[in-house]
Amino acid sequence: MLAVLITGAVISKGFQDEPAIKVSDSGKAVWFRVGKKVYDPQAEDNRRWININVKGFNYMAERIQKMQLKEGVYVNIRGRLDEDVWKDKDGETHKNLYVIAEDIEYAGGKSKDESESYTAPVHQPDKAPLPTEAPGEFTGYEAFGGTSFFDD
């Protein structure tokens, strides 16, 4: 599986007036789409939207439901890429890529209705200060084989 990191994507509107976040009857699976505007020199205004299918299972399904995500909310997602393969009633094979969410958080953006912010308060543990010097005689670079072509 390929690891995927999606940042600053927006929860897409549900297809044909369906909810943006769909939940299985058992509550152990959710699926939705996110959209992201990307650079494309061949598109009008050099920008176009891409849409990505996302699925979450078990603990992720519970977490997504607790977050009360809805259309227009900006999120960051970490997950892995997978593929659905199926045959339709005519026997034609179809494939669809999607992301299996392993972690999700609010991206801190605003919904399409700019008056309402969906930024969630997050507790960040205190971070230890970064060292000002490298330990021992480490210079930050060590070539393979122990020699450096920078040292002539």
Image (tube, grey):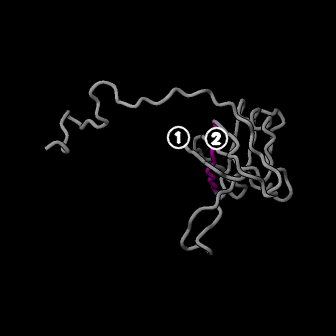
Q: Is residue 69 left or right of residue 78?
A: right
Percent across and percent down for residue 61 are: 74, 35
* Residue 108 falls inside the magenta stretch: no
In percent of the image, x 70 and y 43: which residue is there?
106
In percent of the image, x 66 and y 50: which residue is there?
86
Quadrant of the image containing the C terminus: top left
Residues shaded magenta: 93-102
Number of labels in the image equals 2
In percent of the image, x 75 and y 39: which residue is there?
120
Q: Which amino acid lies under the numbered mark 1 shown in the image of this protein?
A: Met
Residues at marks 2 and 1 touching, judged by CB atoms closer than 8 Å: yes
Frontmost residue, 32 versus 134: 134
Q: Which residue ends up furthest to the front in the rendered image? A: 132
In percent of the image, x 34 and y 25: which residue is there?
135
Residue 12's place in the image compared with 56, above or below, is below
Q: Is residue 79 left or right of residue 134?
A: right
Helix, strand or loop for disc 2: strand
User: Residue under circle 2?
Assistant: 100
Q: Which residue ends up furthest to the top in the rendered image? A: 136
* Residue 98 falls inside the magenta stretch: yes
**Spatial separation of the CA atoms under disc 2 and disc 1:** 10 Å
Characterize the magenta stretch by its predominant secondary structure. strand
Frontmost residue, 53 versus 123: 123
Q: Quadrant of residue 39?
A: bottom right
